[in-house]
Amino acid sequence: MKVVIIEDDRTTALLLKAHFEDRGDTVIPCVNVREALSYLERELPDVAIVDVTLPDGDGKKIVEAIRDRPQGARVIVVIYSATDPQSLGQIQGADVVIQKSSDLRELLNVTASGKP
């Protein structure tokens, strides 16, 4: 699968990248909203791991951009945030919200099984 990871924390991004690549996925890292939107104009991934709080804006813009694209509904969109999922509420367009402090296996399982 092609996985785009939109994460500004370098350590977190490298950890996620390593786990997805170990699984055999192709990983496209993006560090901010601008970079992610530029990538999404060219192509859509199978999976998008999106941090909500990014240095140049809100990760919700990325979710909207994915869902607005033709074929955007087929992308598994995971909000992966340090913020408690309860306080984030429902993020329109996201398939699942996972807190960064959760077991990484939860994230890998959600994305391995295909569209929830």
Image (cartoon, helix red, strand yellow):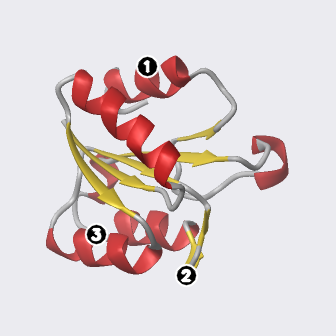
Q: Nearer the viewer, residue 14 or 47?
A: 14
Kindly identify the residue that appears in the image at 36 percent across and 33 percent down.
115
Query: Which one is closest to the eye, mark 1 or mark 3?
Result: 1
The reply, left or right, for residue 19 in relation to residue 44 is: right
Q: Residue tagged by mark 2? A: 56
Q: Which residue is found at the position 23% from the left and 51% from the top?
A: 45
Q: Nearer the viewer, residue 46 or 74?
A: 46
Q: What residue would you read off at disc 1?
A: 109
- Label 1 vs label 2: CA separation? 30 Å
Decide which of tag 1 and tag 3 comes sooner along the chain.
Answer: 3
Nearer-N-terminus badge (3/2): 2
Q: Among all residues in the image, which is located at the extreme right?
A: 87
Q: Residues within 10 Å of mark 1 (few under 14, many from 20)?
A: few
From the viewer's side, name the closer residue of 95 and 12.
12
Q: Amino acid at mark 3?
A: Arg
Identify the residue at horizontal 58%, vertical 76% (top origin).
Answer: 55
Q: Position of residue 29 (x, y in %)?
A: 31, 56
Q: Secondary structure at mark 1?
A: helix
The residue at which mark 3 appears reads as: 69
Marks 1, 2: nearer the viewer: 2
| Type of amino acid under label 1 | Asn
Q: Is residue 18 above or below residue 87?
A: above
